Image (cartoon, helix red, strand yellow):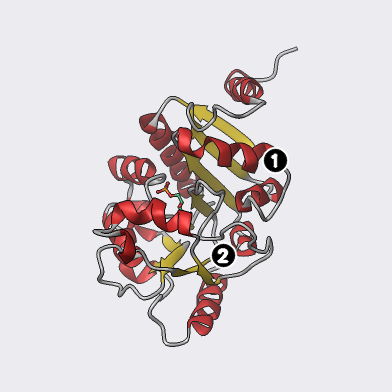
């Protein structure tokens, strides 16, 4: 795991956007896995500021969607991805995929979504946030570490955390469709972003705890190319904080005897 600790949202946006733009320019990133929520917003905005025509050719796959919210509901992830990703990065809407949480057969929809991802050649870089309970996508604690896209029930704590986006807490859907942990591990590269002290315990468990379904993000310890992008507050419980800072310094300065 590469753990990068930065000063704040501005630096996180610039670092994440730089990583993605390099990959796009090198032809390594053609398909982006996109997350909703607050964490990736600084990266989407920095990408919009530094927009290059090659971005418009990206395919994008969302991590998840609520069950029962129509695509045109402002809080559906169809709408959030359209506002924050498709429009800002000027992607072709035909190349942006979000699972349909209103499908008549939700299991069949999840299978269709996996097949569409496979047909596109898989995700080259998957952006992730992390829940305070350690979820990635909506893989709540106890999710199978090899799970695929499927319907899931949201934990009460996740619904409370996401209530800030809705007019009333009761309006937060109870169920979702989410890429599984196995699906996320299939991405060639993953970039997880966490900001704020509220994420510090989940980040500690994900990076330095045991690999366990009780902290779903800990499965990223098994990924060969996982970068964890943190602000100081989110990094405050890491035992090896100084080591991660030293390692990044070495990347910049090079190895020295
Ligand atoms: C979003 C998603 C979630 C969020 C997580 C953190 O598509 O799948 O895992 O990334 O809940 O949310 P924020 O960034 O709002 O704190």
Q: Quadrant of the C terminus?
A: top right
For label 2, the SS is loop
Task: Measure how far apart labels 2 and 1 are at the Cα level.
Answer: 28 Å
Residue 155: give its label. none
Indicate yes or no: mark 2 CB to ligand 1 under 8 Å. no
Viewer-closest of 5 and 172: 172
The residue that mark 2 highlights is: 122
Asked if the residues shown at circle 2 and circle 1 are in contact, with their CB atoms under 8 angstroms apart, the answer is: no
Viewer-closest of 157 and 41: 157
The residue that mark 1 highlights is: 209
117 left or right of 165 in image:
right
Image location of residue 46, percent across then percent down: 34, 40
Q: Earlier in the sequence, mark 2 or mark 1?
A: 2
For label 1, the SS is loop
* Residue at figure coordinates x 48%, y 63% from the top left: 154
102 vs 55: above or below: below
């Amino acid at each position: 795991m590469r753990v990068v600790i930065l000063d704040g949202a501005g630096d996180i946006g610039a670092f994440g956007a730089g990583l993605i733009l390099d990959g796009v320019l090198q032809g390594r990133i053609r398909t982006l896995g996109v997350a909703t929520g607050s964490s990736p917003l600084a990266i989407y905005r920095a990408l919009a500021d530094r927009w290059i025509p090659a971005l418009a050719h990206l395919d994008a796959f969302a991590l998840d969607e609520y069950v029962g919210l129509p695509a045109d509901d402002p809080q559906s992830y169809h709408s959030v991805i359209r506002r924050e990703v498709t429009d800002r990065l000027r992607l072709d809407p035909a190349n942006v995929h979000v699972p349909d949480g209103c499908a008549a057969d939700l299991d069949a929809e999840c299978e269709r979504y996996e097949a569409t991802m496979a047909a596109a050649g898989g995700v080259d870089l998957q952006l992730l946030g992390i829940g305070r309970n350690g979820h990635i996508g909506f893989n709540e604690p106890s999710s199978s570490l090899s799970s695929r896209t499927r319907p899931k029930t949201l934990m009460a704590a996740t619904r409370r955390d996401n209530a800030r986006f809705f007019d009333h807490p009761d309006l937060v859907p109870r169920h979702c469709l989410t890429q599984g942990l196995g699906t996320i591990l299939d991405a060639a590269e993953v970039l997880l972003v966490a900001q704020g002290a509220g994420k510090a315990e989940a980040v500690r468990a994900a990076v330095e705890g045991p690999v366990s379904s009780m902290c779903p993000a800990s499965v990223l310890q098994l990924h060969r190319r996982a970068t964890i992008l943190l602000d100081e507050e989110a990094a405050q419980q890491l035992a090896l904080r100084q080591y991660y800072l030293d390692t990044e310094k070495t990347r910049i300065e090079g190895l020295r005897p």
